[in-house]
Image (tube, grey):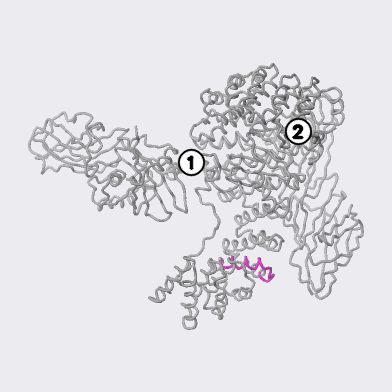
Amino acid sequence: MIHSLFLVNASGDIFLEKHWKSVVSRSVCDYFFEAQERATEPENVPPVISTPHHYLISVLRHRIYFVAVIQSEVPPLFVIEFLHRVVDTFQDYFGVCTEAAIKDNVVVVYELLEEMLDNGFPLATESNILKELIKPPTILRTMVNTITGSTNVGEQLPTGQLSVVPWRRTGVKYTNNEAYFDVVEEIDAIIDKSGSTITAEIQGVIDACVKLTGMPDLTLSFMNPRLLDDVSFHPCVRFKRWEAERILSFIPPDGNFRLLSYHVSSQNLVAIPVYVKHNITFREGSSQGRFDLTLGPKQTMGKAVEAVLVSSQLPRGVLNANLNPSQGTYTFDPVTKLLTWDVGKINPQKLPSLKGTMSLQAGASKPDENPTINIQLKIQQMAISGLKVNRLDMYGEKYKPFKGIKYMTKAGKSVSSYLFEFLFI
Amino acid sequence: MTDSKYFTTTKKGEIFELKAELNSDKKEKKKEAVKKVIASMTVGKDVSALFPDVVNCMQTDNLELKKLVYLYLMNYAKSQPDMAIMAVNTFVKDCEDPNPLIRALAVRTMGCIRVDKITEYLCEPLRKCLKDEDPYVRKTAAVCVAKLHDINAQLVEDQGFLDTLKDLISDSNPMVVANAVAALSEIAESHPNSNLLDLNPQTINKLLTALNECTEWGQIFILDCLANYTPRDDRESQSICERVTPRLSHANSAVVLSAVKVLMKFMEMLPKDLDYYGTLLKKLAPPLVTLLSAEPELQYVALRNINLIVQRRPEILKHEMKVFFVKYNDPIYVKLEKLDIMIRLASQANIAQVLAELKEYATEVDVDFVRKAVRAIGRCAIKVEQSAERCVSTLLDLIQTKVNYVVQEAIVVIKDIFRKYPNKYESVIATLCENLDSLDEPEARAAMIWIVGEYAERIDNADELLESFLEGFHDESTQVQLQLLTAIVKLFLKKPTETQELVQQVLSLATQDSDNPDLRDRGYIYWRLLSTDPVAAKEVVLAEKPLISEETDLIEPTLLEELICHIGTLASVYHKPPSAFVEGSRGVQHKRLPATANSPDASSAAAVADAPPAVIPSQGDLLGDLLNLDLTPTTTGPTPAVSTGIQMGAMDLLGGGLDSLTMIDSVWVQVWVPAMKAKGLEISGTFARRAGVIQMEMTLSNKAMSVMTDFAIQFNRNSFGLAPAGPLQVLIPLSPNQSIEVTLPLNTVGPVMKMDPLSNLQVAVKNNIDVFYFSCQYPISILFVEDGKMERQVFLATWKDIPNENESQFQIKDCHLNAASSKLQGSNIFTIAKRTVDGQDMLYQSMKLSNGIWVLAELRVQAGNPNYTVTCLLWVQNT
């Protein structure tokens, strides 16, 4: 199981260590630093590194490496998942997960790590339970603590830990009973230069914020549940009921949690919300190139495409770009050759465009890399897959809760297209 | 008001200051001081000097203070064992606290104090906590057993904690079950044969029930434990699969992968025509695809595992090619893995898409990735014949880019394409030759030289090209030198008239001026070949080469099977068996997939490979005899078989008459005493071992004219002390022309004398007419006792201990795997282990003779070669 944990910052200093079994010397991290040096980019450090006596499994989050040391055969995914949980918990407790935040709250961090893992076995990782054991630091509480001498540590046995619903604490009370659900979809697509889609997939999640008194039992049904054939649920969802009736039935945890995540990959269901028209040419012998890029919405069911951000890595040969955006602003960094164009909202009546010239290095040869453009965007009030919630019901409690559902579509890590074509005439 | 203030004290005498604060009367000041101590500890400052003062703060009602002190204790108790004893009393008291949180905390902390002296005091409280009414305490105590075991394994066994832990598997609380399983699994790792996790249908059922209700981590432990179980039949395996499949939709990817492991393993047992089998295959694809949309670290581990799954069952992901397309912002380690899987999934149907992608990748920035992409294009060409032409033209396009490393990589793969499709794409050679000067890597240079040599007759200036390489011969790496030597010899054989000078030059360079033994030897071989018999040289050097195989980099099947059983573990990330690299996994059990329901004997055929009969007639020593005779029994046949000829016959038999031979009882009776020599009494018979008893089965025939009565039998002293266990049971008189079959049970307690040959048995049979003497040979296998199966560890240790003089090696010819396998088991020859080294299967077997002598054998089987090598070691147990 997990032996030790080291937190390493971007400059390669170990700023926190925690051992759950015998103490492992810090020098074990040297192997990690070696790998870090070899990697060209910080995120290219391999996640599993073997050393003569230990294995190092690391994740990089918020520019901090979380390096777990293990000694025997342990499922690496188990370790990685646990490390993610640690990061999530820190973020939950301190708002941000940075070196400064961790150093500021080092005692709480230590207490948390102690509660999360016992002898390398996960103990309490649900944030509901942890918060009962160790109260998150707030300015008010710190003040109260200093005055009254009380502590952050709960005096109670975490009751939820042993009930049938370990994810929910008992005795929850609210004056305003509310349940909000956010359907957020991220679309990842690669489009080739002729405009046809190479891959497209939607990664969707339903995040919930449930503040309901007592032990509510919720059911959530969809207009088109058939879309969801590849899903992963929060442990609270009753899987049998979903398989039989395609209805989500669950007793929710208290507070914020991710109810389910899903994945739509079949090509015909994934509509790309924007299109790109481009015309980029270079002339042999001349040091000028023409650049012409137009964006337009498509298949958005009348919803506006907002917060559009286009970025592209131009070839090394490009010295500068003199462009004229019809809306928004653009920047070109002559050092990194990164072109970014903050478009904003797309107006279907007046399509945004970016036109102008690029100046090339004199006598530059044909660029040998194929630049891509990358698009970020947001669409409110729509899930691009067409997923729609039908109704939300509550059983088990008498009061009438306030319910809300929000939809949103974003571009994922990459809506990108290989679209530059360099013509040498 | 944050904790960072604890780091800021840099004044002199910090420790002293803290000491004063710790001993302060004010509770608040004490707590602040402990916090400061902990803060110093977390950043690695040594605050162990404060040990007694911190321990003094332990007796408090304040839970936070208690926890902080506990934290401190865990860190420093090891360095101050004597002081740590002071804390024991508080622990014992806390273990009886009415608050279960404190009870659990105390037992948890005690387990973390790795001091031998303290562990003794821990036993009693731990025993109580294991039976605590509160499940939270029980679950914590279960983990504590694992901790204690890590510190002092003997103590845990002596105190009977292991049994209590086993009982907890049937606990009513799912979390307790999960923790008990986790603890037992960890303990079992250091005791591979202890059978701690004794899985039977009842416990499996309990685990499956707990699976639905425990936390995600508990589910991982339980699923990993389930994967070690072997179901009795396909129905059980199906029902387990049905109960595990819901886990595929879990949000925790480790749960998903562990579930995939269980399903992949148990699926082996399902008949392929079953509807459920198809359903299961379909269900496996989406979760695997989902893993790829997670964080890059998770993706990496998932991809390494998918690589295995795709090799074992390509049908699962054959339609999912697109999810493996590389995204431009993937980390390099994910990109490389994705490429690997793309090649494995490439088929005629999707090759166009794959090639288009690969071509894009080949223009990316990262050098490693580009190289691998170019190499992948070559592999596509080799794998999908229809695409070869397209691949070659793609490679040519890439060569036109003149990017140095792309060109070099392309030339290396084109060499492989030439080897797969000879005489098809030689038209591109001209283009390759243009880039000769830009090659600076040995592999690319060697590949290019190989191409020039191989197609020397089509390249007009081949001699010039090679000559140009020859100029800097001594600066080249060995790889290039060897290749250059061969290429020039090839050239000479093809165009002898013009290149004589060149070949002499290279030969003298290789043989006289080089220090490299490989190079020198190869040079001499060529030289002699060319000087003695140029025709033969031509036949040797220009012989037709076998085509290279389609799939490269495939994991060898037995290893793949083992790795499938380890999906989700480090082994699956490194693609090595756990025994190969995990420290502390002493003698990890080699896991293998269960056999398919359709072929019940598949497992035995796989486990036990083949028979060792060895024939070396002149082996005089004991061992030789043993083995010699060993042959006879396994074939149950020709007992007089001493001469090699007959034994060879037996070998043929092994190869040919498969079916009849698989039955150990197919007796081949010999005539021991012909009627002529025994005044009309004919005795024929055989030996057998039935249900642990050695039997001599005889047929007595009266070929004389008078009645025979009063039969009796006696044995002379023999090598293994065989003696009749009772009198010969011939009760009725034997009339003329009548036969009677008698079975005589034997024991091995008679007097011993070494015979030659070893299995010789001298027998005297008496009847009313006379006493007749004859000698016969028994198959040595009747002496192999049923408990001849050695523990793996013992086997390993013994194998090393046995001195060389007890070792003997034999070749067996023309053996066939399946025929002998069941025979071996029938003869009490047990296969202990199997491993594969360099394409050779090695089988390790043990057998034990009735007199306590062990024989350990190693059988090497080269795939496709009917000749096997047996190494035998003899070991006498000192009792």
Q: Is residue A22 above or below residue B110?
A: below
- x then y, percent, for residue A188: 76, 51
Mark 2, residue position:
B39
Query: To which chain does the residue with label 2 belong?
Result: B
- x then y, percent, for residue B147: 60, 29
* Structural crowding at the residue carrying mark 2, measured as other residues with C-alpha within 10 Å and reported as few (<14), some (14–19) or many (≥20): many
The secondary structure that dominates the magenta segment is helix
- x then y, percent, for residue B127: 58, 20
Q: Quadrant of the C terminus of chain B?
A: top left
Q: Secondary structure at mark 2?
A: helix
Mark 1, residue position:
B597
Q: Secondary structure at mark 1?
A: loop
- Nearer the observer: mark 1 or 2; the answer is 2
Q: Which residues are magenta?
A: B399-415
Quadrant of res B864: bottom left
Q: Identify which residue, B493 or B514, lies in the foreground.
A: B514
Which tag, 1 or 2, sits closer to the chain's start?
2
Magenta stretch: includes residue B413 = yes
Q: Is residue A237 visible?
A: no
